[in-house]
């Protein structure tokens, strides 16, 4: 959604024409504390309400401003009105971290699979998101259980509107349908959510480790990608630290299972106990998920299985790792033949289209009564590998990731107890991250103050040298220049020290921010508006390329 050059230019002009009094106005970072309606997890106490519509309007100007605009409306041009609107829009809100998400807790798999973005496409998605008018930074976390987009937005409402429309455009899912399922979290709530995700608290299977690896992958893929900026990168890196700390300091990972192990448990729940050792197992896909399925089957006593994969290399590697287990490799071309000889079929490939349809399955031979007389399809892929119409075939039963809830519903009290232990760590780490982010606010002031002092130094140096005449030596010029720099640096040393803070001490941070605001007022540094000028200027330059 590209902004027109004239409109973006008008926004820039409006920002450039703001008075210094507006620059002194500061506001705390927006924070929303509502809770998600119909929360599916008791441990989430601060989820925001699911949005039922796309709100794209911000609060109107104050009554006084409106009166002024109204009184001079006949004498100002449309452009001048646009300038006023733009100045209000970009100075009343500060950049916010926002997550627009759809997860297994709020969204059925048939919707999630349309929104899924392959890992190879994450950099492209980040670029497109940061090309939106109100988005500065972005990251994509797309797994079988969730599709979440994290952004730093210049405006919360407009940013959410633009990202939602982008999601609709790329997935084909109508905006109205997305709004029925999505959840929105802002700033500290967004931070805490990602930390819970990384710790495994938001997973269908509490404490599962694969999600931490997926969060790590977001950082790995994002390195060097324009748009995976300082705030989002710092957020995800901190989330990795939180995930590791929770698993180290609590017993949340003790006995934890993954989606793959839950899939195996589900299959065994549906098979007669007497057939567990003899049921014919077929695993389609030998990637990370498929490998875990194989390992969990072995852990449950399975000693023979067939694995269908595009190439034999991965299957051979798994075979070498699992000594004494008969793992038979078959190419994808033999998939239907292998399915005809299997009692249980696990699918976990990256295919974007189904591998099994109703016509494929209805012609398969019936399975024996000793295994229940039903062929089980356990599909843990998103997008799904098995079409939903397969569920209508007599003699077949289909399960997908959403059906794993039946497995993890057990031991609910134990899950909640472990989650409470981890929640204390997450709350502590969330405060540390927010303090770190707050400490970044002083960076523009430091740069502005040094630039302000340098302008004065250079101007006074020129005056001094002009009075000394043209016949002074280079050595004298250098000595005078060094003297002026030394004086400025010594004068700035104290203020600079009081503007630097690592965010680890809340008292020090509070004092640092007070110092920043004081310096902004004393020297008319216009820090906040100047930063916004730079952001909008960058957007204008981007759209002109």
Image: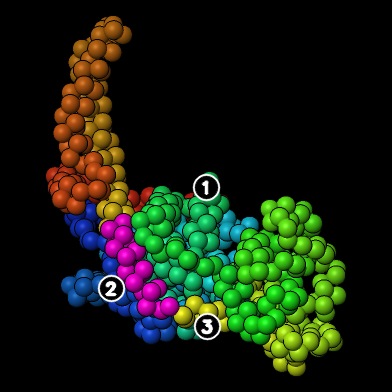
* Residue shown at 31% from the left, 74% from the top: 46
Q: Which residue is mark 2?
A: 33
Q: Is residue 293 above or below residue 456?
A: below
Residues 328 and 122: in front is 328
Q: Earlier along the polypeptide chain: callout 1 or callout 2?
A: 2
Residue farthest front in this picture: 274
Q: Residues within 10 Å of mark 2 (few under 14, many from 20)?
A: some
> Disc 2 on helix, strand or loop?
loop
- Numbered tag placed on residue 191 in the rendering: none
* Residue shown at 29% from the left, 44% from the top: 443
Q: Residues within 10 Å of mark 1 (few under 14, many from 20)?
A: some
Q: Is residue 238 magenta?
A: no
Q: Position of residue 273 (x, y in %)?
A: 64, 82
Q: Position of residue 179 (x, y in %)?
A: 47, 81
* Residue shown at 32% from the left, 69% from the top: 420
The reply to whether residue 489 is in sight is yes
Q: Position of residue 100 (x, y in %)?
A: 45, 70
Residues 511 and 381: in front is 381
What secondary structure prevails in the magenta region?
helix
* Residue shown at 72% from the left, 52% from the top: 320
The span from disc 1 to disc 3 (Cα, nearest Å) is 38 Å
Q: Earlier along the polypeptide chain: callout 3 or callout 2?
A: 2
Q: Is residue 336 above or below residue 392?
A: above
- Numbered tag placed on residue 406 in the rendering: 3
**Residue 491: quadrant of the picture:** top left
Q: Which residues are magenta?
A: 411-429
Q: Is residue 518 left or right of residue 375?
A: left
Residues 528 and 167: in front is 167
Q: Earlier along the polypeptide chain: callout 1 or callout 3?
A: 1
Q: Which residue is mark 1?
A: 223
Q: Residues within 10 Å of mark 3 (few under 14, many from 20)?
A: few
């Amino acid at each position: 959604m590209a902004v027109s050059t004239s409109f973006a230019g008008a926004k820039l002009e409006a920002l450039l024409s703001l008075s210094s009094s507006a620059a002194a106005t500061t506001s705390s970072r927006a924070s929303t504390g509502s809770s998600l309606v119909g929360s599916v997890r008791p441990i989430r106490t601060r989820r925001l309400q699911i949005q039922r519509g796309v709100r794209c309007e911000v609060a109107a100007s104050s009554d006084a401003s409106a009166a002024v605009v109204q009184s001079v409306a006949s004498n100002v041009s449309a452009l001048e009105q646009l300038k006023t609107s733009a100045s209000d829009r970009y100075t009343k809100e500060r950049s916010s971290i926002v997550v627009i998400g759809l997860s297994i807790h709020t969204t059925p798999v048939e919707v999630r699979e349309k929104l899924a973005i392959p890992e190879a496409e994450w950099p492209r998605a980040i670029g497109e998101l940061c090309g939106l008018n109100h988005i500065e930074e972005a990251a994509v976390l797309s797994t079988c259980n969730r599709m979440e987009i994290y952004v730093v937005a210049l405006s919360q409402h407009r940013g959410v509107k633009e990202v939602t429309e982008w999601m609709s455009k790329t997935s084909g899912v109508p905006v109205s349908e997305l709004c029925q399922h999505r959840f929105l979290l802002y700033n500290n709530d967004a931070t805490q959510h990602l930390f819970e995700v990384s710790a495994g608290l938001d997973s269908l299977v509490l404490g599962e480790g694969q999600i931490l690896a997926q969060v790590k992958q977001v950082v790995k893929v994002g390195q060097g990608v324009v748009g995976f900026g300082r705030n989002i990168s710092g957020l995800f890196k901190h989330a990795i630290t939180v995930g590791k700390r929770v698993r180290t300091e609590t017993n949340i990972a003790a006995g934890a299972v993954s989606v793959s192990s839950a899939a195996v448990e589900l299959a065994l729940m549906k098979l007669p106990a007497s057939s567990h050792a003899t049921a014919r197992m077929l695993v389609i896909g030998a990637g990370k998920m498929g490998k875990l399925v194989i390992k969990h089957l072995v852990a449950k006593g399975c000693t023979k299985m067939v694995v269908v994969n595009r190439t034999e290399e991965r299957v051979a590697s798994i075979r070498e790792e699992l000594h004494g287990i008969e793992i038979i490799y078959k190419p994808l071309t033999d998939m239907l033949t292998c399915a005809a000889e299997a009692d249980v079929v696990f699918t976990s490939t990256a295919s974007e289209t189904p591998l099994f349809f109703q016509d494929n399955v209805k012609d398969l031979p019936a399975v024996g009564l000793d295994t229940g007389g039903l062929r089980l399809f356990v599909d843990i892929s998103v997008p799904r590998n098995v079409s939903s119409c397969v569920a209508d075939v007599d003699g077949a039963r289909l399960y997908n990731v959403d059906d794993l809830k039946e497995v993890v519903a057990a031991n609910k009290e134990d899950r909640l107890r472990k989650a409470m232990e981890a929640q204390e760590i997450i709350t502590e780490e969330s405060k540390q991250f927010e303090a770190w982010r707050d400490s970044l606010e002083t960076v523009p002031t430091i740069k502005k103050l040094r630039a302000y002092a340098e302008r004065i130094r250079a101007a006074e140096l020129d005056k001094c040298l002009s009075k000394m005449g043209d016949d002074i030596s280079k050595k004298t010029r250098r000595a005078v220049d060094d003297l002026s720099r030394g004086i400025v640096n010594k004068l700035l040393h104290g203020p600079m020290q009081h503007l630097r803070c690592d965010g680890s001490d809340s008292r020090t941070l509070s004092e640092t921010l007070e110092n920043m605001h004081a310096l902004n007022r004393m020297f008319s540094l216009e820090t906040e508006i100047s930063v916004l000028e730079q952001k909008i200027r960058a957007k204008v330059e981007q759209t002109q390329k």
